[in-house]
Amino acid sequence: MFVDNVDIFIASGKGGAGAVSFRREKFVLNGGPDGGDGGDGGDVYFQVDKNTDTLSCFRGTKHYKAKNGQPGGSKKCSGKRGEDIVIKIPPGTQIFDFETNELLYDFTDQDFNVKVLKGGKGGFGNARFKNSVNQRPTYSQSGLAGEERHIRLELKLIADVGLVGFPNTGKSTLISVISNAKPEIANYEFTTLIPNLGVVQPDEMNSFVMADIPGIIDGASEGRGLGIEFLRHIERTKLLLFVIDVSSYQSVWQQYEKLRSELRNFSLELYSRPFGIVLNKIDVLDFSSKAIDEFYVSLGIKSLKSDCFGLDQKLEYFIDKNLFEDNMKRNANAPLFVIPISSLAQINTKPLTFILLKALKNQMEDVL
């Protein structure tokens, strides 16, 4: 089960109490105080586990507490320190304070344990309070209490490219064709119910990660459908890829405008992310369709024939070099590229991987 949002309670251990003890030994008169200190309470750590990609392990347990420190003993024996607790989380997890919604920690690829709560300090035994005036102290310190916190864990998948589109536009088929992901694919809407990650390898030397989220519908930014639940999973991406279905009852321009509007309403930062467009399912239509031509005119993009990425000669590769370079400079209104593809017939899918790689590397001079 894919789980990306849970709230839990964490607490560090309490410090052990110091001991009140006096030396009692044959032939030793007035041995004096020998109570030992209490042990410190255990700390709470978080560790990034790259072998996990969901928060489902937190569904059955709500409370996580480190061990308390042990009390001190006689003969100045200190109590045992409380055992730490290490909580493993997948990369991309954010920790928020449940009450204030404040972001406390953001875990991406840290290779070390991060201490979140410190255990309470153990109390001093009565041996610590002996002096020339008070040679027989009959008191000690109790240990300090540990820290407690109610937190929310929120997972945001870490990917380089995020797919955005309406339901049943071929996003799952596309990611299954160009990556190692194996999502469920069927001819009905909302086949994808959870995000999918796939590693794309254009060649033997390079690779990048692509994320597919459930389809977005009108009003997704207001909580409709599944889109709002998973839009956060593409917030970390460097590049967005809009998948538009040219065979849909909605026009190409309508799909584009609605998707852009939902992103803008959800997050201005996500809206300003560099993006490209693929026109999917072109194998079922005459590609010289007037609606598609009008889409390019609306975007202000010229049609250029190019085979620099091995694109099929029977199709055109639409891109304007100036728009590409401008968008890499954060001109959010211009797409990096617009490419006709067919994920099912695998038309232009392999060249698409090289174009995405070039965009991610920001090597505009080699694109055209």
Image (cartoon, rainbow, N blue to C red):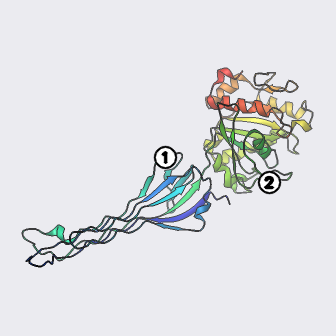
Mark count: 2
| Viewer-nearest residue: 88 or 2 | 88
Tell me the quarter of the picture where residue 211 sits: top right
| Viewer-nearest residue: 81 or 153 | 81
| Viewer-nearest residue: 95 or 224 | 95
Query: Counting residues from the N terminus, which is met first, the one under dot 2 or under dot 1?
Result: 1
Estimate the x, y position of residue 206 in percent, counting from the top left. Answer: 65, 32
Q: In this view of the protein, can residue 113 be seen by the observer?
A: yes
Tell me the quarter of the picture where residue 58 sits: bottom right
Q: Residue at x 63, y 46 (%)?
A: 267
Q: Residue at x 81, y 21 (%)?
A: 305
Q: Which residue is mark 2?
A: 191
Q: Amino acid at mark 1?
A: Asp
User: Is 307 displayed left or right of 76 in the figure?
Assistant: right
Q: Residues within 10 Å of mark 1 (few under 14, many from 20)?
A: few
| Viewer-nearest residue: 252 or 148 | 148
What element does badge 1 sit on? Answer: loop
Q: Quadrant of the N terminus?
A: bottom right
Q: Amino acid at mark 2?
A: Thr
User: Any mark on residue 111, and which?
Assistant: 1
Estimate the x, y position of residue 11 in percent, counting from the top left. Answer: 44, 65
Q: Residues within 10 Å of mark 2 (few under 14, many from 20)?
A: some
The Cα atoms of the two marked residues, 2 and 1, are separated by 35 Å
